[in-house]
Image: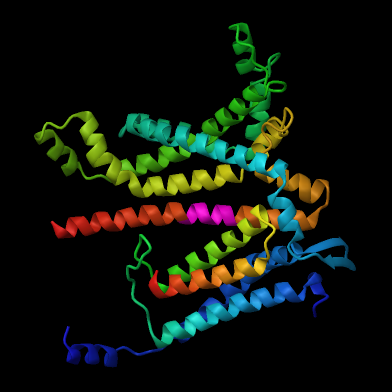
Amino acid sequence: MTGAKVWKRTMNKIPNNKAWWLVLPMFLLVAFSAIIPLMTVVNYSLQDIFDQNTAYFVGVEWYQEVLRDTRLHDSLLRQFGFSLSVLLIEIPLGIAVALMMPTRGWQASAVLILLALPLLIPWNVVGTIWQVFARGDIGLFGWTLNNLGVDYNYTSNSLDAWLTVLLMDVWHWTSLVALLCYSGLRAIPDAYYQAAKIDRASPWAVFRYIQLPRLKNVLVIGVLLRFMDSFMIYTEPFVLTGGGPGTSTTFLSQTLTQMAIGQFDIGPAAAFSLVYFLIVLLVSWVFFTTITHMEKSDNGNKHDK
Amino acid sequence: MLNWMAWTMPSGLFFIGIASILLVMTIFEIRKPCVERKGWLPIPTTRGDRLFIGLLSSAFIHLSFLGLSDLSLWIALAMSALLMLILLRWG
């Protein structure tokens, strides 16, 4: 672009930014509902608060305490293990389900509705359903396992409890990944499949070089949603196992709630919430940046060719 | 004013600091709009990206100082400031 053109363009553009004032009401709302509460958490994390009039400034003491607390280390590790398992199971399973779904006719609608059903059930109801379903005496799942000779009891065996929570999450949320992938798959033009047919591409090659790259966008959303949701999971394990046996299914948010509401330790709970928040922020940012960056370099390569 | 919601001076100063950083960056952006570029970071970044990376890593530097050592937080603060400078200039 020559200098004259740039000059002309900048002359035609009217630098009027008054429309930004229209953002003000939204900003005030967000400030009231999110920014100021978050600031309050930062403020509380620096103090020892007894009641409305008694608060002592303790500096970073709570952070020191919280970061060296083995109970919190354990629940953080447990949480990462759980979220990782959720992603490792739900993402491939969701893709597989989406690939097998019928594409037209009444079957397609029927499968879509069936898949959407678990998503419509509230968290605490899911917990209750599985609480009954997995019981050894009256629950179908627990009773069947026990009669098949498997020693299964989610209230006393920590591994059983952990697997039950994981299975419950898979049952509840794989549909989301599957539905996202299904919509991604439907957006692929037929020409791609025709080209693959002409090239006699194997089904695996079609999946690897046509479907998977095209699913990337929805998978980003799926991975992010599933990571954040499972990382902040509270209601379902709370209803199902109450965090037990022992602490084997006490995930981060439950530990936090016990601290904040059970023991009324607002200071440490605030400090830990912020650490929690920073971890979620970091992981989400890394996911998001990696994937959008991958996309950009892909597009760059296409333009080069 | 500071009695409301148990506000304290240090947290107040912290937020005034953050707000003024954002304000300065906004003015800077209007005066001299930045372009995305590639520095030593593995991804091309804008000025705001580098600020965000700097702030987030400063938070984790402070947390690791608190969690892993008994050293003074002023050292963490100095390290963060240095990192922020390097990030903004060459990142």
* Residue drawn at the location 28% of the way across and 93% of the way down: A11
Quadrant of the frame with the N terminus of chain A: bottom left
> Residue A101's quadrant in the figure?
top left
Q: Can residue A116 be seen in this view?
A: no
Describe residue B78's horizontal placement relative to residue A246 as left or right: left
Image height check: is B66 above or below A93? Answer: below
Q: x, y percentage for residue A49?
A: 84, 62
Describe residue A51's horizontal placement relative to residue B24 as left or right: right
* Residue drawn at the location 34% of the way across and 68% of the way down: B39
> Residue B55's quadrant in the figure?
bottom right
Quadrant of the frame with the C terminus of chain A: bottom left
Pick the front one: A74 or A24:
A74
Image height check: is B24 above or below B67? Answer: below
Residue B84 belongs to magenta span: no
Residue placed furthest toward the front: B71
* Residue drawn at the location 64% of the way across and 11% of the way down: A151
Q: Can residue A164 be seen in this view?
A: yes
Image height check: is A132 above or below A122? Answer: above
Pick the front one: A143 or B80:
B80
Describe residue B65's horizontal placement relative to residue A298 as left or right: right
> Residue A289's quadrant in the figure?
bottom left
Residue A279 belongs to magenta span: yes
Q: x, y percentage for residue A131?
A: 68, 26
All told, the count of numbered labels is 0
Q: x, y percentage for residue A106?
A: 36, 31
* Residue drawn at the location 68% of the way across and 23% of the way down: A132
Pick the front one: A260 or A48:
A48
Judged by its main secondary structure, the magenta piece is helix
Residue placed furthest toward the left: A198
The span picked out in magenta is A278-285
Q: x, y percentage for residue A56?
A: 85, 66
